[in-house]
Amino acid sequence: MDNAYIGPARSSNTGGSNDDSSGDDSSGGDTAACTTPICNGTFDSVDHWLNSIFDVNIVTEGANSFYQVDVTAAGNPWDVNISQVMTITPGATYTVSFQAKSDRARTMLVGLGLNHDPWTNTTETVSLTTDWQTFTYDIVADGFGDDNSRVLFDMGAEIGVVSIDDVTVVMK
């Protein structure tokens, strides 16, 4: 797929590697130590985050690290995605909070859903600007949830650079 470019900023990746070697935690993080619904919401490394088509891209500016992708061709929203596997309790309400911005006015989707067929999910449309903003949504896992669910950010429907940071998910 040629709808996203992760270019020069890739050199700022603070963990992981550019190859596809699974099981190698070259960032030094302990991926088993997480006891919250999601881990590493501050993107200090690539630990715990999954991407639909490329390695997770972490950018560091000063002391802050965050996820960033440049969507160069619009397509399906899920064509450019970042997600993290988590346990979701069916019927429960979760508060999803994060910071995000873009290099232009555009939208993306945030949500909770299954990480397997039938990919059931609930999403919200997020309107991004060029400034960092904090977004908070209460999302109900209506009719889905198990130990192989996920928090998701779908960004492939529109072009532009998208940055995400400080992700939290809390069951209400």
Image (tube, rainbow, N blue to C red):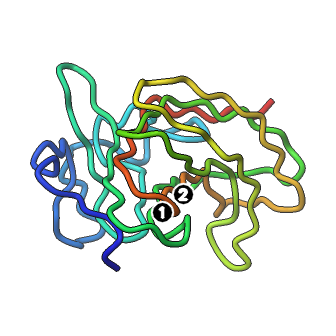
Q: Position of residue 62 (x, y in %)?
A: 17, 20
Tag 1's secondary structure?
loop
Q: Which residue is mark 2?
A: 154
From the viewer's perspective, is residue 128 above or below residue 50? Answer: above
Left or right of residue 75, residue 104 in this image: left
Left or right of residue 140, residue 17 in this image: left
Residue at screen point 54% across, 57% down: 154
User: How many C-alpha atoms fall within 10 Å of the one at disc 1: few (<14), some, or many (≥20)?
Assistant: many
Q: CA distance from mark 1 to mark 2?
A: 6 Å
Q: Is the N terminus in the top left, top right, bottom left or bottom right quadrant?
A: bottom left
Residue at screen point 85% across, 43% down: 92
Residue at screen point 76% across, 55% down: 122
Amino acid type of disc 2? Asp
Q: Farthest residue toward the top? A: 63
- Is disc 1 in contact with disc 2, using a CB cutoff of under 8 Å? yes
* Residue 165 image-quadrant placement: top left
Q: Position of residue 116 (x, y in %)?
A: 64, 74
**Numbered marks: total:** 2
Dot label at residue 16? none
Q: Farthest residue toward the front? A: 105
Left or right of residue 59, residue 165 in this image: right
The residue closer to the viewer here, 102 or 167, is 102
Q: Nearer the viewer, mark 1 or mark 2?
A: 1
Q: Which residue is mark 1?
A: 156
Tag 2's secondary structure?
strand
